Image (cartoon, rainbow, N blue to C red):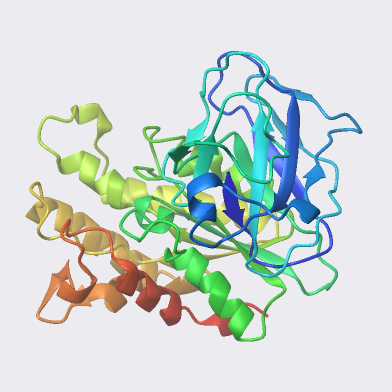
Amino acid sequence: MIARVSTGGAQIRFAFRNAAGGDAVTFGAVHAALARTDAAALADGAIDPSSDHGVTFGGKPTVTLFPGATVWSDPVALAVPPLGSVAVSVYLPHPTATNTVHALGLSPAFVVAGDATSAPRLASPQRLRSYFWLEGMSVPATDPSAGTLVALGDSITDGYATTPGLHQEWPALLAERLQREGKGGLSVVNAGISGNRILKTGAGESALQRFDTDVLARPGVRWVLLMEGINDINMSIIPGVPASEGVEARQIIAGMKQLIERAHLHGIRIAGATILPTKGLPFYSAGGEAMRSTVNQWIRTSGWFDAVIDFDGVVRDPADPMQLRPAFDPGDHVHPNDAGNRAMAEAIDVSLFP
């Protein structure tokens, strides 16, 4: 699996999680290396062999993930440059159900039979774009001003309509911008899940459920950038969806207040991003638009958030503010394309993050 860091450093650690329950999962071996990024490497998962390191857990090369458990590796003496790509290779010695998957990985992953964790390149691999059990990576900071920004969101944060492999989702572009503008000690964690909601479980745990593991359990978190709510609205207006799935604007706002309170309890600041327009969806309705308007008005004016990121104002069409700008619309009328994500990343006031 190929994953990209934000900040660089002389060491790196890896977190794996058996989040979805089911049977325990045993890794027979885990390796990490710098991934090659040339065109040929995208076909066979080539690495820089001189950078290959075995990964251990409590000094041992194997580890078992029990249901619901998260494990962190020992530090690996792998020097990683800022925005560097790391190949994380896992060997499964037994037939294993892939019960914990981040389906929209956007970066390449490769599967072959046998233990190829230290192979310089793979022979005729199956190519995918998902992460399996890989919860995150951590580069120990050397600068006391360093910290982590967690982008907590849904498919728009996940990068649904962006070009795979090019790191065009707005959190990745924000990470590039921080490096470019002299804030290289700040990393950006993309905690977006396509289909995710604030209030109810569906595509992954709700934001309220996963806040502890996806935000509070991350090392060095200074800010949360919250962009959620559109799926709560859509599941309330899609024809045929059970009424029990529906919510009201006041409940979405109450959920946001809870996330703000929980962040502040841990000394973390939280920015609220306005919800993007969706006119053009087959189930778009005046009722859903009224909910979005109510929530956005609260985000902008309530003063609850430590900062407001007006993504709605950035991507909406001046000629019809209830829909995306045509230049940002990939055709589905809800997920900004590469250009839209770049505009979003550029609109964030990075002076908020010292």
Residue at 29%, 52% in the rendered image: 230
Residue 26: give x, y in percent of width and height: 70, 20
Residue 87: give x, y in percent of width and height: 64, 49
Q: Is residue 65 above or below residue 122?
A: above
Instruction: Give the quarter of the image for residue 197.
Output: top left
Q: How many marks on residues?
A: 0
Q: Residue furthest front?
A: 123
Residue at 39%, 50% in the rendered image: 154
Relative horizontal placement of residue 6, taking residue 229 as reference (left or right)? right
Relative horizontal placement of residue 261, taking residue 290 as reference (left or right)? right
Q: Nearer the viewer, residue 267 or 141?
A: 141
Residue 347: give x, y in percent of width and height: 41, 80
Q: Is residue 77 above or below residue 26?
A: below
Residue at 28%, 65% in the rendered image: 336
Q: Is residue 146 above or below residue 203?
A: below
Q: Nearer the viewer, residue 14 or 222?
A: 14
Q: Is residue 197 above or below residue 293?
A: above
Relative horizontal placement of residue 330, taking residue 126 as reference (left or right)? left
Q: Nearer the viewer, residue 161 or 233?
A: 161
Residue at 22%, 64% in the rendered image: 293
Instruction: Give the quarter of the image for residue 351.
Output: bottom right
Q: Quadrant of the N terminus?
A: top right
Instruction: Give the quarter of the image for residue 24.
Output: top right
Residue 38: give x, y in percent of width and height: 54, 62
